[in-house]
Image (spheres, grey):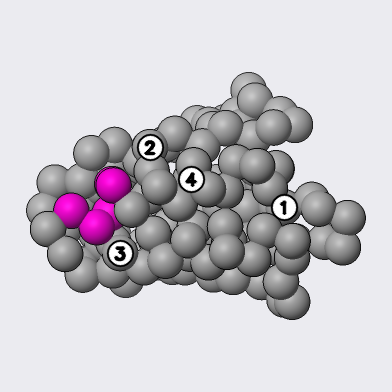
Amino acid sequence: MVIKSCQSDAILEFAQPRGEYVEVSLSRHDLHGRRVVWLYTDGPLIADLFRSMAGEWRGWPGVKCWKSVEGELSLTASHDSIGHITLWVTLGTVDYEDDEPWKIETALMLEPGMLDGLAQDSDARFRQGS
């Protein structure tokens, strides 16, 4: 599943899940990060996030959020009163890892017309076998 910003070169990509894990990459012209994210049993909740956004394409109050069990990936979506949808994505290491810690964050701008397709793609990607 690939999500491309409609206003920049930012891209969020979820590779095919393997059991409880999925490889996630986040890139933009000046940054790139990739890591395997443990979904545990929360993969369908990513699909719920996109399904909820599609169902409320005209807007919703506050933000809609999803965060991985260990915190290495978070998605936060907001909608303003004139139809702009911002998906903030944070990807990085978790506190207990021995590697040098890193974190990247960027915003992807989405159009309301993209949401049904993202909901369908996320259902197909994250509801397998559920």
Which residue of the protein is positioned furthest toward the bottom in this rendering? 61
Label located before the other in sequence (1 or 4): 1
Lower position in the chain sequence, tag 1 or tag 3: 3
Q: Are marks 2 and 4 in contact (CB under 8 Å)?
A: yes
Q: Is residue 126 magenta?
A: yes
- Real-space CA distance between mark 1 and mark 4, rounded to the nearest whole angstrom: 13 Å
What is the spatial separation of the Cα atoms under label 4 and label 3, in whole angstroms?
13 Å
The residue at which mark 2 appears reads as: 1
Amino acid carrying label 3: it is Pro
Distance in Å between CA atoms under marks 1 and 2: 18 Å
Residue to which mark 1 is pinned? 85
* For marks 2 and 4 on the same chain, the one whose residue lies earlier in the sequence: 2
Residue at coordinates 63% horizontally, 61% vertically from top-left?
Answer: 77
Q: Is residue 83 visible?
A: yes
Q: In the rendered view, does 32 fall on the left or right side of 35? A: right
Q: CA distance from mark 2 to mark 4?
A: 8 Å
Q: Amino acid at mark 1?
A: Ile
Residue under label 3: 44
Q: Residues within 10 Å of mark 1 (few under 14, many from 20)?
A: many
Q: Which residues fall within the magenta stretch? A: 124-128
Which is the main secondary structure of the residues drawn in magenta? helix
> Tag 2 or tag 3, which sits nearer the N-term?
2
What kind of residue is marked 2?
Answer: Met
From the image, tell me which residue sits under label 4.
Answer: 118
- Where residue 57 is drawn, which disc sits there? none
Q: Describe the element under mark 3 as helix, strand or loop.
A: helix
Looking at the image, which residue is at 65% across and 42% down? 113
Residue name at image x 70 percent, y 52 percent: 86
User: Badge 3: how crowded within 10 Å, few (<14), some, or many (20+)?
Assistant: some
Left or right, 84 with reference to 3: right
